[in-house]
Image: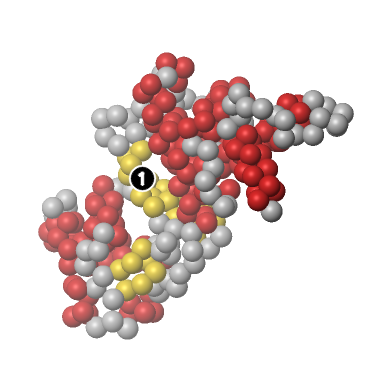
Amino acid sequence: MKQLARLQHTFQDRVLHPGQPESTAWISATGRAAPELQLSVYVQAYRARLKEVLTHDYPATLAALGDEHFNRLADDYLGAHPSHYFSLRDFGCHLPAFASEVIQKDTGYQDMRWLAELTLFEWTLGQAFDAADATLVTAQAMAAIPPGDWPVLRFTPHPSVHRLDLEWNTPELWRALTANRTAQVTVTARRDTASPWLVWREQLVTRFRSMHRDEQRALDTLCTGGCFNEVCDVLATLIPEEAVPLRAASLLKSWIAQGLLSTVQ
């Protein structure tokens, strides 16, 4: 068994780290192909499978870059982040951060500064879709809570809820590219003021939408543990004080209707 274990370890090491100048004497030379070619079949198949995973997780990025540039990005990513996961679902999790790094370091990506944001948006969509289920807060449950308890109420966001601040027209770009890979889409920067966006799953459908600044501040307060009274305090810094109660109640009603909240306490 020790000999088998050594053989398995050697095989795994050569597949995960190709190009090492090591002997292939451990590979049978009696086959139709040379030992080096036999090993390369497994190496290429393994890398091709990982690249296939990235194309499924990042279809709009593939469409935006084209096959050649995407293949180069995937090769670079494989070199920097070899898979250490039991599930391939998590393999592409580092691509947004990696894309941000290569944009700064690699001149080949200097005209693609939107790339990091597009990959982040795509990964967030996948995370929202795969998020765990949770019981949702209902309007009926809220109606049963005495009005005097509302100021101290705290809510837990549904596991699928994510917040993004986007500087580019990334959602429009993603929508166009996933609808038609040959679409010509203009990417425009909005570096002066990033736009707040919300991503979540409603039943089995992944949703996303932009947010007004007061809603973004209110929801961020709630999602970081703030009580309903603190949400109202935040709104009071952004809108007239007399408009706060109606706006706060309206936002809470819409969040509940969209399935953004899973518990209330």
**Hey, which residue is sitting farthest top in the picture?**
107
Residue found at x 56% / y 24%? 72
The residue that mark 1 highlights is 164
191 horizontally vs 85: left or right: left
**Hey, which residue is sitting farthest front in the picture?**
2
- Give the image location of residue 3, x and y in percent: 68, 47
Q: Secondary structure at mark 1?
A: strand
In this figure, which colouring scheme has been used for the structure? secondary structure
Q: Quadrant of residue 179?
A: top right
Q: Amino acid at mark 1?
A: Leu
- In this rendering, the count of numbered labels is 1
77 horizontally vs 38: left or right: left
Residue 177 appears in the rendering: no
Residue 1 appears in the rendering: yes
Residue found at x 29% / y 29%? 191
Q: Quadrant of residue 112?
A: top left
- Give the image location of residue 18, x and y in percent: 61, 29
Q: Residues within 10 Å of mark 1 (few under 14, many from 20)?
A: some
194 horizontally vs 126: left or right: left
Residue found at x 26% / y 30%? 192
Residue found at x 73% / y 26%? 36
Quadrant location of the C terminus in the rendered image = bottom left
Q: Nearer the viewer, residue 53 or 139?
A: 53
- Give the image location of residue 40, x and y in percent: 71, 29
Above or below, comparing residue 68 to residue 134 in the picture = above
Q: Quadrant of residue 106?
A: top left
Q: Nearer the viewer, residue 236 or 28?
A: 28
Above or below, comparing residue 135 to residue 206 in the picture = below
- Give the image location of residue 44, x and y in percent: 68, 31
